Image: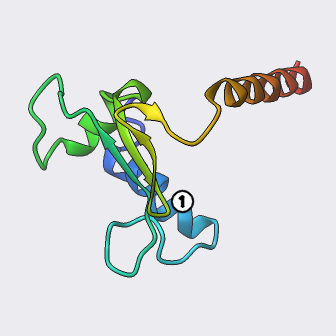
Amino acid sequence: QNPQLMPAHQVWYLATEGGARAMGMEKVGRLEPGWTADLQLIDATLPTPAAPHNLYEQLLLWRNHTHVRNVMIAGQWRVRDGIVLDADVEEMRARVHESAERMWEKTS
């Protein structure tokens, strides 16, 4: 949340193409012909105007999971209009809760 520590465009790169490269994945993380990339569409109502000079900051600092409207993974819509289509959300929450509990137990 502190753009002074790392510029938003660098965080974006690390979360997309750079992260994929670090894991040995080639041609992943760009919207470009021949590349593999998942797609996330967000609510574009931003607190201030988005422009080329501040787009990364707008997306990374001022958006969160509540703004995600649609998600496509491997060519299949997984979230439409904010609704998860093909997963049991309650089961996923329970699994995340259990994982978090195990993590806290290991670190305490």
Quick one: quadrant of the N terminus?
top left
**By what rule are the colours in the image chosen?**
rainbow
Regarding residue 1, the answer to whether it shows in the image is no
Is 77 located above or below residue 95 in the figure?
below
Q: Position of residue 23 (x, y in %)?
A: 64, 66
The quadrant in which residue 62 appears is top left
Q: Position of residue 103 (x, y in %)?
A: 83, 28
Residue at image x 67%, y 23%? 90
Q: Left of 26 or right of it: where is 59?
A: left
State the SS at label 1. Answer: helix
Residue at image x 13%, y 47%? 53
Q: Left of 30 or right of it: where is 20?
A: right
Residue at image x 37%, y 34%? 68
Q: Left of 96 or right of it: where is 98?
A: right
Between residue 87 and residue 71, name the one nearer to us. 87
Furthest residue to the bottom? Answer: 34
Regarding residue 79, the answer to whether it shows in the image is yes
Quick one: quadrant of the C terminus?
top right
Q: Which residue is mark 1?
A: 19
Q: Position of residue 61 (x, y in %)?
A: 33, 30
The local crowd at label 1, few if under 14, some if 14 to 19, many if 20 or more residues have their Cα within 10 Å, is some
Between residue 4 and residue 15, name the one nearer to us. 15
In the rendered structure, which amino acid carries the disc numbered 1? Gly
Q: Left of 16 or right of it: where is 45?
A: left
Q: Position of residue 43 (x, y in %)?
A: 25, 32
Residue at image x 18%, y 41%? 54
